[in-house]
Amino acid sequence: MTTATFSKDAWYAVAAVDAVGPGEVMPATLFGTERVLWRDADGEAHVWDNRCIHRGMRLSFGFVDGDRLCCRYHGWAFGPDSQCVRIPAHPDMTPPGDFRIPAAPSVEAGGLVWTTLDDAAEFPGVSALDGLVFCRTVAFAADAAAVAAILDDAEFALPGGGAPDGFDRSLEPGGITVIRASGENGVTLAVALQPVGPGTCQAHVFAGPVSGDAAALRRHFARWAQRLRLQVAAGQEAAA
Amino acid sequence: MTITDDAASLNEWYAVAGMDDLRVNGPRRTRLLGQDIVIEPAANGAPCVATAGEGAGRELPSQVLYGYVWASLGEPARSPLDMPEFAEDRRRFVDCGTVTVRTSPYRVVENFLDMAHFPYVHTGILGEEPLTVVEDYTVEIRQPEDEIWATDCTFYQPKAAMSAEGGIQTRYEYRVGAPCVTVLYKTCPVVEDAWDLIGIFVQPREEDLCDVHVWMLLIDDATPLASLLSFQHMIFVQDRSILENQVPAGIPLDVGAEMAIPGDKMSMTYRRWLRQKGIVFGTSRATA
């Protein structure tokens, strides 16, 4: 298997769908380009430039008012189409049509929110996550490519204990590494990597199938992700 | 770490140390426009000496004014702004300390000149929804001083100052005496028809890092110093959470780089004035 590569024009996961609930706002960064991810009261997720067009304030510090994202600095409110709809300093003014936050493409699929820096890139689909549950998002102080290289050799114990006979690995669209334990009760682990910027990335970790105790499965692979984090940190330290 | 050749910036006066701070802590080693400088009380009768560079260094033009040591890396063509209120006996000077902020000095000044953020950044203190309207005001560049003045500014404030009892319609005048020097005149809650002065002298250390020297000149004998300081610190910490999250840190001076509304005319005048002076250090042009 070849190691995953991370091109700037591809789609990547930026958060688990539950990480940003209705009315919540968070930063979502790809290759150092800052985006804001927020979900309106109707449940729709939006990914925009993380910068107010007025005075450059990061919108990830903003607040949601119904179907609007409001800037923390002056309360400018932007509707779901990212057009400015209200300027509190001049409430009677209709904001001009070019008072608009550049919006990025976004898709919710497989339990994750996805976006891309390339407006023309087509969403590849993420069937690799079908039947799996989200376990955890882990941040790494390492390039996505460095973590991907570690995933090439990564192994895991079965949730009930014991090691599988072996592992099958594949690379799937969306920067997802899938590792399947061999055997009839084989467990599948899938990791969607988010290249946040130089020397930093996030891994969104999924596992399945959910045959019994989903919470135990989540816990098992959340701990696995935590250990991987320590392993990467130790590797970085050794290299330094 | 940029050492600038921006003459417009080099030839300005900057407050680089509080006299209170110098008395208590001794010589201050700091930075100005990307260069090392040292400010120390002088033995030769002068109140202080500022030097740039390593070792003995180069002695800089310096002076003590309004409770601060001022220095320049170039040849300033004019004196710092004139504030006759400093000579009034009834007034109390409050050195509110120095706050380090990771952004351009001009973002700091621009925020200081801005009323529209009061209800959102200083909620329940300097402003409160739904009273968010910025009423029209007058802004002009006064000559020959070459200062920006904004007058007839008003804003409803739930708690305009430590000495304020309940909300008042606060009147303001804003003044920019130099690119990094600004002061506001604000309704004194205690004495009718008098202004309190609140000012910031911004010391640009790097393109995107500054020390903000904050002071007040009040007609208020009653409020304990600790209360005055904690009030001002609370306000400034709220401002800093905004200032360090504006991107880019360098202020854009090109018209249209950031959207503006009529209430921003003070900010737009300030940006145009900086552009006409040819200021580069701390602007988006410097890093572009």
Image (cartoon, coloured by chain):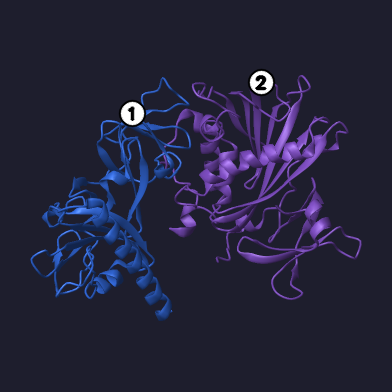
Location of residue B200 (image quadrant): top right
Q: Amino acid at mark 1?
A: Gly
Identified at 40% across, 23% down, the residue is A93
Disc 1 designates what residue? A66
Task: Tell me where residue B120 appears, x and y as whole percent.
Answer: 51, 32
Check the rendered structure and report the hue given to chain B.
purple
Check the rendered structure and report the hue given to chain A.
blue
Mark 2: give few (<14), some (14-19) or many (20+) Cα within 10 Å: few
Disc 2 designates what residue? B166
Q: Amino acid at mark 2?
A: Gly
* Furthest-bottom residue in this view: A239
**Chain containing mark 2:** B
Q: Secondary structure at mark 1?
A: loop
Q: Is residue B224 above or below residue A225?
A: above
Identified at 30% across, 34% down, the residue is A40
Q: Is residue B199 above or below residue A180?
A: above
Q: Secondary structure at mark 2?
A: loop
Q: CA distance from mark 2 to mark 1?
A: 31 Å
- Tell me the quarter of the image containing the C terminus of chain A: bottom left
- Tell me the quarter of the image containing the N terminus of chain A: bottom left
